[in-house]
Image (spheres, rainbow, N blue to C red):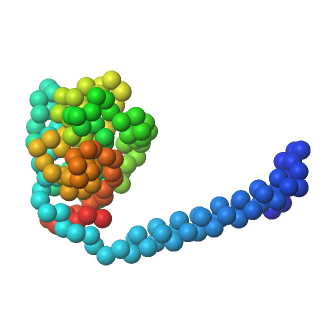
Amino acid sequence: MSVAFPGETPVYRKARDELLAREIELRRLTEAVAEARRRLPPGGVVPEDYVFQQAESDGAPAEVWMSELFSAGKESLAIYSFMFGEERDGACPMCTSLLDGLEGAAGHLAERMAFVVVAGSSVSRLRGFASQRGWRHLRLLSTSGNDYNRDYFGQTPDGNDTSMMNVFRRTGSEVRHF
């Protein structure tokens, strides 16, 4: 299909067509990478049933095990490690922006998988920040007291938090990193 916008020059059109060809090439490469990801063999078995902290409706912290995070009938769990450890004065602005968007998509995600957000801050600090942001749909859990972020690269070797998305698959009672 030949397209020309009003007032464009032949130089511009040539450059746009070359860019379109590269975008199509990128799309094909992206699809090839997605196919390769689907063919991956099973990842490593999760070494422990990590215990996270969550806020109950009254705000009191309660323990929840990783194995309990999977939604009924769903075999996948995505965990986003949010850069909001106790050592930080505030939450990471980039993580916050991403989570603002995921707040709106949480219902759509729940149709396909379980999704939780974890951070090194206390349950009360997480709950306070979520309230400030107006987050009502994201499930926020504290990694305080477990090694999840260290083991799954939500924390650097020197102890600083970093952002990371990990996906896990459950088959029966076995949970593997995907």
53 left or right of 22 in image: left
Give the quadrant of residue 94: top left
Q: Residue 47's spot in the image, x, y percent? A: 14, 63
26 left or right of 9 in image: left
Q: Residue at x 33, y 47 (%)?
A: 163
Q: Is residue 64 above or below residue 21?
A: above
Q: Residue at x 22, y 46 (%)?
A: 159
Q: Residue 107's spot in the image, x, y percent? A: 37, 43
Q: Is residue 78 above or below residue 177?
A: above
Q: Residue 178's spot in the image, x, y percent? A: 30, 65
Q: Is residue 88 above or below residue 68?
A: above
Q: Residue 126's spot in the image, x, y percent? A: 24, 32
In which quadrant of the rendered image does the N terminus lie? bottom right
Residue farthest toward the top in the current orientation of the protein: 132
Would you say residue 114 is visible in this rendering? no
Comparing 129 with 67, the one in front is 129
Q: Residue at x 40, y 71 (%)?
A: 38
Comparing 114 with 149, the one in front is 149
Would you say residue 2 is visible in this rendering? yes
Give the quadrant of residue 144: top left
